[in-house]
Image: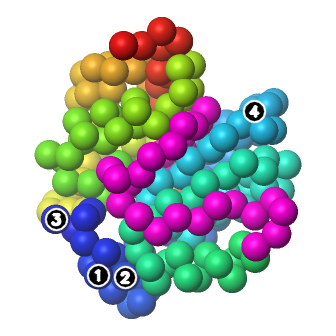
Amino acid sequence: MPEDDAPYWDKRYQQGNTGWDMGQVSPPLQAYFDQLATKDLSILIPGCGNSYEAAYLMEKGFSNLTLLDISVVLMHRLESTFPQASVAPRLITADFFDHRGQYDLIIEQTFFCALDPARRPDYVEQTFRLLRPGGKLAGLLFDRNFAGGPPFGGHKEEYIQLLGRKLTIKTLAPCYNSIPPRAGSELFFIAEKPQHSL
């Protein structure tokens, strides 16, 4: 499956076949980041891509960032984008489903839609494991179908059922500030791991 296939993603980055890449931080995520007051949150961005979100968070003073992607080609590029310094993000080349750690916030931006839909329950389980009690999964989900994939689409009711298995959905609503090509097809969401979880 493509999401588990590092050579597949390496080839897409080598060929510049990255249609999901906006070349900027997503406006809905930027607005969300702007209202985060705690700068020492431990933040994970899985399937991080070119990491415009990470660059923006660093500009805003966030210093505890972990960027994870399965593509070696991409992660080598990020090493020069984010030179190793005291506030550089931690770069990890790995499969999200093998990752271990504990985070206050996990950012979702075009990673979920790259996964085969059969793996979506695994995504929720892994996210639950990676979040600290009270931690949040926040970001964007597509509210539309796609032919073939990746990306793979989905809709609000599906996400409510899926995320609600393990997390408490705080927000799941149409974006009002998407970039024009994605207008009307994105949902912004925040889902929280309960403070007391089994």
Q: Which residue is mark 2?
A: 10
Q: Earlier in the sequence, mark 2 or mark 3?
A: 3
Q: Which mark is residue 36?
A: 4
Q: Which residue is mark 3?
A: 1
Marks 2 and 1: in contact by CB < 8 Å?
A: yes
Hey, what amino acid is under mark 2? Answer: Asp
Marks 1 and 4: in contact by CB < 8 Å?
A: no
Q: Which mark is residue 7?
A: 1
User: Is residue 182 visible in the rendered structure shown here?
Assistant: no
Marks 3 and 2: in contact by CB < 8 Å?
A: no
Residue drawn 81% across the image and 59% down it: 87
User: Is residue 122 visible in the rendered structure shown here?
Assistant: yes
Hey, what amino acid is under mark 4? Answer: Leu
Report x, y in % for residue 146: 22, 56
Q: Nearer the viewer, mark 4 or mark 1?
A: 1
Q: Residues within 10 Å of mark 2 (few under 14, many from 20)?
A: some
Distance Cα–Cα, label 4 vs label 1: 36 Å
In what element is the residue under mark 4? loop
Q: Quadrant of the C terminus?
A: top left
Residue drawn 66% across the image and 41% down it: 42
Report x, y in % for residue 161: 25, 22
Please state the extent of the stretch shown in magenta in the rendering. 84-109
Hey, what amino acid is under mark 1? Answer: Pro
Q: Residues within 10 Å of mark 1 (few under 14, many from 20)?
A: some
Report x, y in % for residue 38: 79, 31
Distance Cα–Cα, label 2 vs label 3: 14 Å
Hey, what amino acid is under mark 3? Answer: Met
